[in-house]
Image: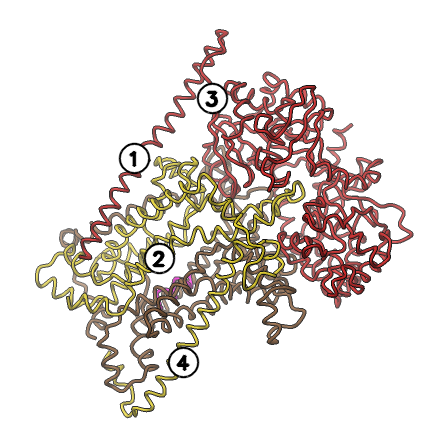
Chain colours: A red, B yellow, C brown
Amino acid sequence: MKKKSVLAALLACAMLASLATGCNNDSGTASTGGDTASTAGDAGDAGDEGGDTSGEKVHLTALISKHSLTKDVNEMQWLQELEDACNVDVEWQQISADWDQKKPAMFASGQIPDILVCATSDSDYVQYNGLFEDLKPLIEQYAPNLQQFFKDKPEAEALATTMDGQIFGTPKYQSVWPNTNGTMYINQEWLDAVDMEVPTTWDELEQVLIAFKEKDPNGNGQADEIPMDFNGGFNSAYGLNQLLGCTGLQLSSNNPQGYFAEDGQVKNYYVDERFKRVCQFAQKLWSQGLINPEAITQDYSKFQSVARGDGDTALVGFTWGWELGDRFGVNVSDQYISMPQMKENEDTEKICYSYDFYDLNYGGNRYSMSAKCANKEAAMKFIDGFYDEVVSMQVLFGGISDGCIADNGDGTYAVLPPQDPSIDPGTWKWNSSFADNGGMYIRDDLQLTLGTDMQAVNEEKAVYDPLFEDLDPQDIYPALFMKYSADDTNTLAMNQANINNITDQTWSAWVSDSSRDIDAEWDAYVESVMSAGLSQNLEIRQAAFETYLANQG
Amino acid sequence: MSTKVAKVPKANKIHERSASDVSFRIVVGIITIFSFVVVLYPLYFIVIASFSDSTLVNRGEVLFYPKGISLYGYEQIFTRPDIWRGYLNTVIYSFCGTALNLAVTLPAAYTLSRRNFPARGIIMKLFVFTMYFNGGLIPTYMLINEVGLLNNPLIMIIIGAVNVYNLIITRTFFENSIPEDLYEAATLDGCSHFRYFFTIVIPLSKAVTAVIMLYYLVGHWNDFFNALLYLNSDAYQPLQIILRNLLLLNQAMAGSSGAGASAYAQQYADQIKFGVIIVSTLPVLCVYPFIQKYFEKGVMIGAVKG
Amino acid sequence: MKQAKTAAVGMPKKKVRPLKALARDWQLWVMIIPAIVYIAIFCYGPMYGLQLAFRDYDFSKGITGGDWAGFKYFIQYFESPMFWPTIRNTFVIAFFSLICGFPIPIILALAINAIKGPAWKRTVQTVVYLPYFISTVVLVAMLQILLSPTTGLVSNALKAIGLIGADANLLGDPWAFVPVYVISGIWQSAGWNSIIFIAALAGVDGQLYDACKVDGANRWQQVWHVELPAILPTIIILLIMNMGGILNVGFEKTFLMQNSLNKGVSEVITTYVYNVGLKSVQFSFGSAVGLFNTVVNFAFLMLANQISKRAANISLM
């Protein structure tokens, strides 16, 4: 009996296996089919030369590294329209997770699709030298939109150009994103409850936090208030580094790894006296139980969840975030206000706020092309299509015919609310289009009414705009625009891993352990960080910064 | 064996024996109940977290019963158009892959368990070497490309056709649990290796076959990395790739500057995370009882006698 | 019990001429050829990639075309300030995972094997193997929730019984990292790892128990004299193979559990290589560190194998 069932199972396996082989054959023909299709494309192209545009569509392959929320790109109507307009038929390969793991194998094997979207980085062009097409001559020949883009925004061209003057990936410009990433929030209802004003110095902040802790400002009779909360590492967008601005230290570009610029000098705040003072202040707050004891260890989910309050009862007093609705949810967000930057103390002369405009609006490496692409003209024209004024807008917010943007017919447009009311506008954007992962050029004079979320973002962050008015380029660290040679990139990476190991442990231990004497440990700490490679990294980055400044003229 | 048994003091009185047997029962009871509870609670937690409001879950307020019930997470999972195709692909890969695994591993393990097989030592050494040393991602990828298995669903069946770890386990079992006198008796009767393998070894090795079958099956079921590397077309993607995308929804936002660049439905993303586990594990859970019955005592004895 | 002895001693080796041996063993060869072919193509085929650790990677020349770098990348790692910390952290985590994680599945298997009621037995068996299917991402998310110092059920329970201090943070305190890593690892895989032992116990001849009972052995002694010897070969083989993983620490779990506070103990070899390669993929450096890791593992494997061969006459090869 049993033997028979085993036999039956094996037979079934064999049959399934042959089925699978059947699939295999299909795939074989499909891939060769791809080849023939691209040859057919060439033929079609030849037809074009005869002046006939109704020829067969050019077949292209493309890979997009998209966000997990993003729907199947084949369902995007706007993209289909673009393909039709460019007379191409694109076979999309879509990757939503773990692209970094697949990338080395695919690139090193040399087998890449014609076009890559948001799938490359600067170091890839060096590492896989010869795999990608230099787009510079192609842009001059076939890409009027990109030419316009580079004319209007020369910094975007600089961003995309390598040290050797080549362009392997096209840039993006989103235009409407704000000047800074993190907003500082304080609970106005709590302030009213404890009868205090919005703090303007660290001392006042401390007094407010103490009142938040002791006077039950949410009025539920429990000591469940978290006076202050932040997220993760020191240099995270909503982390303690935001306090550095109070001491007059100008952060920029999401302050990568602590680097900043001051009077044309590249410095690193991890070895700066002002960083020490922030740590000391945070230690003082922490030791009084004013900071969420989980702040350093909680994941982003928890960080967000706690701030959403318990029903209508808010739980957090003072924190940072992207936007009110995003940070505090629907129930308690109206209790909070975005708060102007504080001074360290009454004597502080200059205060700053992190300037992230470049990082939020510009990006490199959006579209790249394989050097083996059979029809570079068609591919280049297709890439250029994304930079058309109207298409760019749809790349970012979703298609007009997909119902994401309204065309008012008079040259003005409006981002429509999500079709699925259970989804917030931010999610909807990621769901319906390439969004920030795509490449686009949003014209500064585009008449586009933004969605409610982006309007709120820009209103909330307006409070910091005065601090950005007289920014000197010598004080902005433009991480995105600085170029390094391959050797320097490697050195920077090796050193940085060593530096981070010291700085990460040190700041977190200092802040969370009141028995640590920061003053006494400071000199030895600075010495160890410098010798772990920071002095070398500062030299390399200084040179890159000077080159950047020189190019700016 | 008999010598070891002889070491047991024979003077044990019946009540002493029953007293220590009681203590044995108690210890067994404690261990099993403890493991059961310690394992069950977090599993239960995953179940209730998969349909509770994630904000409450993250705040530690969902402990013993679900709160803020919503099926949004499951809705998101099951309304994905690719999920059923993913299921089907995974079932095909797992089923065919495991069949191939067994067809390669069992005979090989038998050969390696024969102590008079001359090449046994060298083959074992060469095999074990590959458990530790490998050429790395890129050369493997290029090889798969060259043999035409890139973006070919067959790769999901062929890759890992023999796992040396499982091979060694099977070989160890063949060596130690199948009485050697059976082989001697069989060869005296002129029985060939083929016949001996199919009529004696396989029926006697149901337990270990069930184990490595489970190992292989689960390996295929959970395999997402090979699919990520070697499959490009959406039509071939197994369940785990689709679920992985859902699983990382939240991380993608939190890790990059994307966290700051957009708001999103975070309370649901977490719900999906827990739901994904249930969706991907339930089918394997159903397979287990069928395999489990081969672990019952006496399977071997019955086979020898029958 | 004769077979055990015969198996241990092995068949006497006769000198046979190769051709004759081939003629005699052709069926055995047929049975192992598929495995050999697979290993030869898919494992030894790409093995040339090992030389990447000794070369500068150059895309245009391929893996075997870059200039020889000798031990440059090994030295780069050995001289890095993170060499000893990463080795130490990796070893500590793997060592405790092995020491604590290895015996528990055996004990669990013996206990499950001893359960009398078939329904309860099946239930326990099924439940304890389930955590194996929980992906690392979810496991770590669950740890975040259950071990939270303020709201976590588990950490509050441990505080209530006084096992950890009131202000302990199991997610951040450096002392807590290894225990949390190891215990959650045991929780996840003990049931799964016990399956092989349960299967081995199923193969124990009932006559052995009977003989033992006749000799007056109690249930403890049956475990000691019948069950343990029966699964001993499996235990030893698995132990040897686990010894070969003494520098293997799961990247994903470590990475997800890592934060600023525990970085001093959680930065392991794999996370370090990842961090170095974050901004620029360093194939050669990664390969060199990986190869170093493998060599150490392999050395431990060989050592364990030799010891076992001498002491118990059981070996992998």
Front residue of A74 and A147 = A74
Mark 3: few/some/many CA within 10 Å (<14, 14-19, 20+): some
Q: On the image, which quarter does residue A141 sit in?
A: top right
According to the image, label 3 marks what residue?
Answer: A374
Q: What residue type is labelled 4?
A: Ile
Gap between marks 4 and 2 measured at Cα: 35 Å
Q: What's the chain of the residue with tag 2?
A: B
Mark whose residue sits in front, 4 or 2: 4
Q: Position of residue B304 (x, y in %)?
A: 17, 67
- What's the amino acid at mark 1? Gly
Q: Bounds of the magenta span?
A: C235-244
Q: Which amino acid does label 3 sit on?
A: Ala
Front-most of residues A445 and A501: A445
Image mark for residue A22: 1
Residue B165: mark in rendering: 2
- Chain name for mark 4: B
